[in-house]
Structure formats: C-alpha cells, structure tokens
Image (cartoon, rainbow, N blue to C red):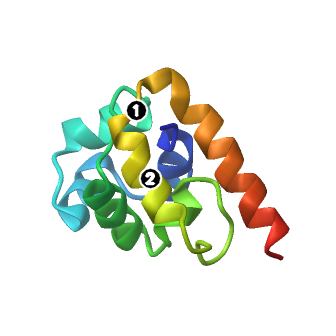
Amino acid sequence: MRIGKEVRRRRQALDWTLEELGHRSGLSPRYISSLEKDLRDPSLSTIEAVAHALGAEPGELLGVKGVAPPGVLEAARLLHGLPREAHETVLRLVRLLGRRRR
C-alpha cells in the first residue's frame, strides 16, 4: 500500500514534524518516517489514526478523493493480507470504482 507520499505531503503542508504527527496519531515518529518512505504496510487502524490526525478521510490517503466510496476501507483490510505486489493492482481498481461513482 503506497500512502507515504500523501502522508508526507499533508504533514508538511501543516508544517508538522514527524514527532507532531506521531503524537497526534498515537504512533512513534520512527514509524511515521517508515510509513512515509513506504517501508510499512499499515493496518486499517493505523491508516484511520493517521488520517484522523491529518484531518483527512482514510480513503484520501489511499488516493480516493473526497469521502471514500463504500468498499474502500474493506479493500484496505483485504490489502493487508495480500502480498505487497498485489497492492497497486487493488488500489487501481478502487480508484477506478471511485471515479465511476461520481
């Protein structure tokens, strides 16, 4: 799951340090750093905690604009159990479904 760039972009837009986002999300600055570098496959609860801290919807961190369409969070749960190579394919499908609903 590749959400690191979006997390970093939003954190920097708020002019927050890794420590600030870590404090607000309940995660360590080291974990936030590895998340931003896409070295971690975050759980759904982690995505939700980071999104909440950043004032975003979880779907927005996954590349779905606005409120996540039904199924996006369920897809994120499924991603967690899939091999990393499959993540981008599933995320592309979720993005396509999100566009079709508009």
Q: Quadrant of the C terminus?
A: bottom right
x and y percentages locating residue 45 in the rendered image? 26, 60
The residue to which callout 1 is attached is 82
Q: Is residue 22 above or below residue 80?
A: below
Q: Badge 2, how many Cα within 10 Å: few under 14, some, many 20+? A: many
Viewer-closest of 67 and 13: 67
Is 16 displayed left or right of 96 in the figure? left
Which residue is tagged 2? 76
Q: Above or below — where is 27 with respect to 41?
A: below
Q: Amino acid at mark 2?
A: Ala
Q: Residue at x 65, y 61 (%)?
A: 64
Residue neighbourhood size for the residue with mark 1, other residues' Cα within 10 Å, grouped as few (<14), some (14–19), many (≥20) = few
* Secondary element at tag 2: helix
Residue at 58 percent of width and 72 percent of height: 68
Q: Secondary structure at mark 1?
A: loop
What's the residue at 63%, 54% (across, down)? Answer: 63
- Can residue 80 be spotted in the picture? yes
Locate residue 65: give its quadrant: bottom right
Q: Amino acid at mark 1?
A: Leu
Q: Position of residue 61 (x, y in %)?
A: 53, 57
Does residue 40 lie above or below 66 as drawn? above
Looking at the image, is mark 1 or mark 2 nearer the viewer? 1
Q: Earlier in the sequence, mark 1 or mark 2?
A: 2
- The CA distance from mark 1 to mark 2 is 10 Å
- Residue 44 percent coordinates (x, y): 32, 56
